[in-house]
Each structure stands twice: as C-alpha cells, then as structure tokens.
Amino acid sequence: MLYTIARQTLLLSVFGLLSFNISLASEMASPSMLSDTCLGCHGPSGISDGPATPTISGMSEIYLIGAMLAYKYDNDEDKVDAVIEADPDLEDVEYFARTSTVMDRIAKGYTEAEIKAIAKYFAALPFKAQKQDVNVEQAQAGASIHENHCEKCHEDGGRSAEDDAGVLAGQWIPYLEYTMADFFSGDRAMPKKMKKQMKEVHEMHGENSVAELIQFYANQE
Amino acid sequence: MSRFTRRKFLKASGSTLALSTAGFGFPHIAMSAKKKVVVIGGGVGGTIAAKYIAKGDSSIDVTVIEAKPHHHTCFMSNEVIGGDRDISTIKFGYDKFADHGIKVVQDKAVAIDPVAHKVTTAGGATLEYDRLVMSPGIALKWEAIEGYDEAAAEVMPHAWIAGPQTALLRKQLESMDDGGVVLLAPPGNPFRCPPGPYERAAQIAHYFKHHKPKSKILILDAKDKFSKQGLFMQGYKNVYGDMIEWVAGADTGGGVTSVDPSAMKVNTDFDEYKVAVANIIPPQKAAQIAQDADLTDESGWCPVDLGTFESKKHKDIHVIGDAGIITGMPKSGFAAGTEAKVCAMAIVNQLQDKEPGLNSYANACYSIIAPDYGISVVAVYKLADDRSKIDKISGGLTPSDATPEALRREVQYAYSWFNNMTAEMFS
C-alpha cells in the first residue's frame, strides 16, 4: 500500500517535471525563428553585405551575449552582473559598456534565454570575411602593429573568436571605424589588456596606427 | 489538400502499407508526391517566403508567379527621386532563384480557385497548390481623389509603386524651374510605408537645397499626425529651414479632394493650389488579385490569422505583406519580410504535420533625411495569446537628442539594411 502510494507520487512528480520542462521549452520560439529576425539588417545567415552593419556569424557566443546584455540593460553594470551571476552558463561573460544606434532598443525585446539561444545559433554559423577596397600600404603597416599588440587575444590575424574576442578580420571598414572611435571616446569600454596595448600602439606608432590596424583587419580574407 | 485531410490520408496510407506488405502491391507514388507551394508576388514578402520555405524543407516544390521580369524596391526609391541614387541600383532580378530550387513563372496570376486549389495565369497556365502564399502588394484607389486616375498619374505621379513612376517624378523635379512648389499629398491610414512620404519630402528638399534653393515643398496631409513625426519635423527644420511646410488634415478639411492635371491644380475643401509638380499618393487597398479571389473584407485589405498568416476567408491561402491586415505591425518592407519568415515556418510545419512553435516578429525602418542624417524606428514583437494582435515588446524611435555622429551612422546602417534586405530577397 505504502509502496503503491510512493510509486504513484514518484510517477506523478516525474510526469510533473516532464510537463514543466516541456512548457518551459515551448515558451520560447526556436533559435532559428528568433535569429531570423536579425537577418534583415545583419544579412542572410548573419553575413552582412555592409557597408556598416557587422557580420555576426562565427562570433563567440560569450561575446554576443555580453554585447546583447549591455544593450538590453543600457550599460547598467549592476544589472548585467546580476544576470551573469544568476546563471552558471554566463560565467565567462564579461560586462563592457557599449554604445549603439538601434541595438539598445532591439535587445530589450529578447529575454536572457532568448539572447543565449540567438548567440549560440550565430556562434555555430561560419564567419565569412567580406572583400572590400583597402589601402594596402596602411594594411601592411597595420600587420606588424597587430602582430606585436593584438594577436595575443585577436588570434590568427583577428579571424579567431577564441578567448571570446570579437572577430575583426574581414569586418566592414565603417564598422571597425565606429568601434574604434567609440573605444577612444569612452562610449565603449576597453578590456584592461586592450587599454594597455592601445596606449602603447599610440605612443609607438603614431596617430595613423588605428587607421592602419583597421585597414589590416579589413584586408584579411 | 488540407492539413486535416492530410492526416487522414497518412492514416490511410499506413494501412495501405500494411496491405502492400501482404502482397497487394499498392504503388507508393502518392506518398512521395511533392507538396506544392505557389507564391504570388515577387516583392519582399513573396521572395523571402519562397526562399525560407525552400530552405525549411527542400522537398517542397516552390513556384513564384511574378508578372514583371524585374523588381524595383520601394525602399531607397526616395533617394532616386532626390537624385542621390540611380534607379538601376534599386532594380533586381530573379536569376538566383533556380539555385534555391525555386521556379519563377513570369506571368500574371489572374484567378484563384480556393476549393480546387488552383491558380490561373494570364498566359493560360494552371498551377496546383497545397498552400498558396499571396504577397501581391497594393492597388491604388483610383478616383478616391476626384480626377485622379491612371491617366492623371502620368501627369501627377504617385511614385508609390517603384519603377517608371519613380523615374517620372524624378524627371519632373529635374525639369521644373527654381522657385516652384512641389505639392506632396499623403493618404490617410492605413497605407504602404507610413514614413515614406515624409522621407520623400526630405529627399526632394535635399535636391532643392543644392540645385533649386528657392523652391518649396508643401505637404497637404489627409492625416493630423504621421510616423516619426517629431523626428521628421526636427530634421526638416535642422537641415532645410522652412523649405518644407506640413499642413495637417484638420487644417485642410482632410487633405486633397480633387485634382485637375491639365491645369496642374490641386484642391482641398478650402483652397485651390497651382503647383509645378504634384506627387499625389492616393488611398490604397490590397492588390486586385486579392480582391478578385475574395480574400479581402470591407476594409479592402485581407484578414488573416496573425500566427500563420492564413486567410480568414479561404483555407490554405496565406496573405503577407502590405495586402494583409497585420494588427500591431506597420505596412513596412521589413514587416513583410518578418511575416514571410513566420508564414514560411508555419507552412513547413503544417506540410510536415509538425506542431507549430512560437513566433518572433521584428520591424526595422530607416528614413534618410539627408546624406548624414538618418532616423529609425524599430520593434520586436510577439503574438498576443488570443492571436488578436502582434504585441510590441520593445523598440522605439531614434532619440530626439541623438548626436550628429549617431544620425550619420544611421544612414550607413540604412544602407546596410537595404543591402541585406535585398540579399535576403534576391541572393
């Protein structure tokens, strides 16, 4: 008798758990359904035709989540940190302030779970560098600057999304220019290591160094 | 074949399978018969729906029926009118569709039989479908403004369906003398591209500022307010001083009521205007084929289920884009694209007998006031629980205190939007 009741309870709770999980999953649109809404601006499969919107495919999942959370919470560090702390999946996400034109308005439309699903979706797609007109001389000057100051984190000529760095190789020049302008104006926060390196870059290679780096990344295929 | 009878059909085929193993040898052709989707219209909704259905299930036979060999996008056509862009840059073809396994029939759909599931074309072809996607766009309501018919539009262009009309308006602006008045008459709601007329006014002002600085633009609106109004009015003043004057419907008795193209005269209930160029954008309704197929209601637009975009009037026909009544979303190009993606997923799920998942919808709409001055409105939406509307979750306008640098970037993002939207459609 006791055994039967226990078994029934067990069955009930297993069933309850199961249906709970199903209802959780069904509260969210599929990763592709969610991500398809991004493509009108970021391009088919997340590969942008430019001239300014970045390619988001092949980016690091952690990087994309960090960006979306900063947009969603209007650079409120405490709120972003609270979200990161509450979710073991987000352990590696770091908060960096960033500015935007439309993304802060858009990111608020997605829950943290949806942002995670979107980030995972695009991270799994291949990155494709875009061919664009570059200043070859500047790109060559940029190559050695990159090697000495940036390669450690932006590995493989800025192609790698390892270490959760942004993929720079083959991104559109206006996007790279906006990003660097925001870093230097303070609208976007630089990671500590980057701050140190960029200071050295500026001191050692002069005021054209940033433009040279941009041309170098734009020239990577 | 409806999705309900399809279930029965599958059950029936299951028993047929049992019979055939018992030696009756029933051929399985019916089971492997390809599902057919026909898409009417090769604009934003039609192209994206076709591509996403083909991508969602490559076994589905997808055919697009489009009368014109090329599509001119409405988006960026205002830059053609302003002179910063050549019309060839908004012209696209369907040559890549074969790569996606999509057939394109260059013909005009003229009749739909919703019971027999058949579409007839002007060329005499008959196409059968399991699902029909209609993205036919708009029809202009001729004579809604007295005297404004197809012949009048050759003198006073609407330029609201891009192509020759766009080129005509541009030509008129080029040939008018400096010091003239361009009258722009936007319709009441609802109509295609709500911010379009106001971006157009700015693009014409941009041309005048550099080439005909004594000229003026007079907007005689049928409405008392319009999309992105605060941002447009701020932009007009900041960039063009008093070159653009907007008059609310309340001050004219509801906008333009009649036109006299031979005298270049435009009338409201209160006044008569003699102008150099008249851009009359008349009231609109769903395209003729949607009217003829009994897909519209008394409003002239097509009522649909907002989760699948299936017509509320005829089963297995889905209507997307400007022709639909999409409560909660604007009649924008981006909206048509998002509707196409949601509709494509619904159709793929239905044809595969799969339970539908939840939908996600978005809109992003840029307007270019000047080459370094862009504004936007964006939104992310979800379907309301009772499916009565598509609810906005987030979004909004460019802030009114946006920096000049942010406004400059918005133009570059608008160009990116254009390149990526047209890649979604035609690549």
Image (spheres, helix red, strand yellow):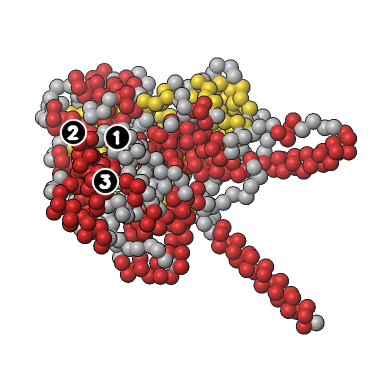
Residue holding disc 3: A176
Q: CA distance from mark 1 to mark 3?
A: 13 Å
Q: Position of residue B172 (x, y in %)?
A: 23, 21
Residue linked to disc 1: A132
Q: CA distance from mark 2 to mark 1?
A: 29 Å
Tell which of B45 and B325 is nearer to you: B45
- Most extreme residue toward the right is B23
How many dots with numbers? 3
Disc 3 crowd rating (10 Å Cα; few below 14, some 14-19, many 20+) is: many
Residue lying furthest top in this view? B123
Q: Residue at x 18, y 33 (%)?
A: B206
Q: Residues within 10 Å of mark 1 (few under 14, many from 20)?
A: some
- Residue A13: tell me if it is visible: yes
Instruction: Give, as a three-letter code, the residue at label 1.
Output: Gln
Location of mark 2 (residue):
B206
Residue mark closest to the camera, 3 vs 2: 3
Q: Chain of mark 3?
A: A
Quadrant showing the C terminus of chain A:
top left
- The vertical placement of B210 against A27, above or below, is above
- Judged from the image, the secondary structure of the residue bearing numbered disc 2 is helix
Q: Disc 2: which chain? A: B
Residue B133, percent from left and from top: 54, 34
Report, in whole angstroms, how far the alpha carbon at label 3 lies from the one at label 2: 29 Å
- Residue A77 placed where, x, y %? 31, 67
- Identify the amino acid type marked 3: Leu
Left or right, B210 with reference to B310:
left
Residue under the point 28% across and 57% down: A98
Q: Chain of mark 1?
A: A
Tags 2 and 1 both on a single chain: no
Name the residue located 32 percent from the left edge and 55 percent from the top edge: A153
